[in-house]
Image (cartoon, grey):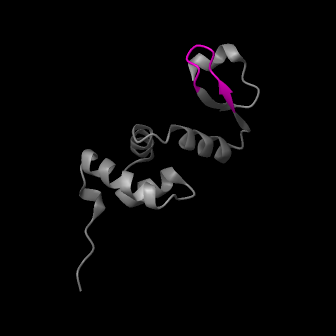
Amino acid sequence: MKAKKSRKRLNQEGRLHNARKWLSQNYPKNLVQAYCKRYGVSEAQAQWDLLELGYRDDVRIQAYESEGVEWEYQVDGYSGEMKVVPKGTPEWELYLL
């Protein structure tokens, strides 16, 4: 029987490449925890990697929901981007996020 290859030994570049394929096929309920478990990295490193892969909104939404904070999308007046923010955030605070 062949032993499974440990994914913990992947460097950051290999981890990001592998994670991009993994996330396109499977979307776990808790991204950060699933990423930590799969690649053996800290939560902070998992968040940075997921942000780099383009999962910024998903990471924020899951963080807000785990803290029990209601969230919404608002348009940033400076950049025109939609941002995930806590509900009731004034427009002048959007550039801080």
Residue situated furthest front in the rendering: 80
Q: Is residue 52 above or below residue 27?
A: above
Magenta-span inclusion, residue 1? no
Q: Residue furthest right?
A: 88
Q: Residue furthest bottom?
A: 1
In the depicted structure, whether residue 13 falls above or below residue 82: below
Decide if residue 15 is on the left or right side of residue 52: left
Residue positioned 74% across, 38% down in the render:
70
Who is closer to the viewer here, 92 or 25? 25
Query: What secondary structure is the magenta-colored segment mainly?
Result: loop
Residue for point 42% across, 46% down: 46
Quarter location, residue 75: top right
Q: Where's the N terminus, which quadrant?
A: bottom left
Relative vertical location of residue 56 with respect to residue 62 in this rendering, above or below: above
Q: Which residues are magenta?
A: 73-81
Percent position (x, y) of residue 43?
Answer: 45, 46
Tell me if 19 is positioned left or right of 26 in this view. left
> In which quadrant of the rendered view does residue 24 lie?
bottom left
User: Quick check: can you spot residue 40?
Assistant: no
Q: Position of residue 66 (x, y in %)?
A: 65, 47
> Which image quarter is the C terminus in?
top right
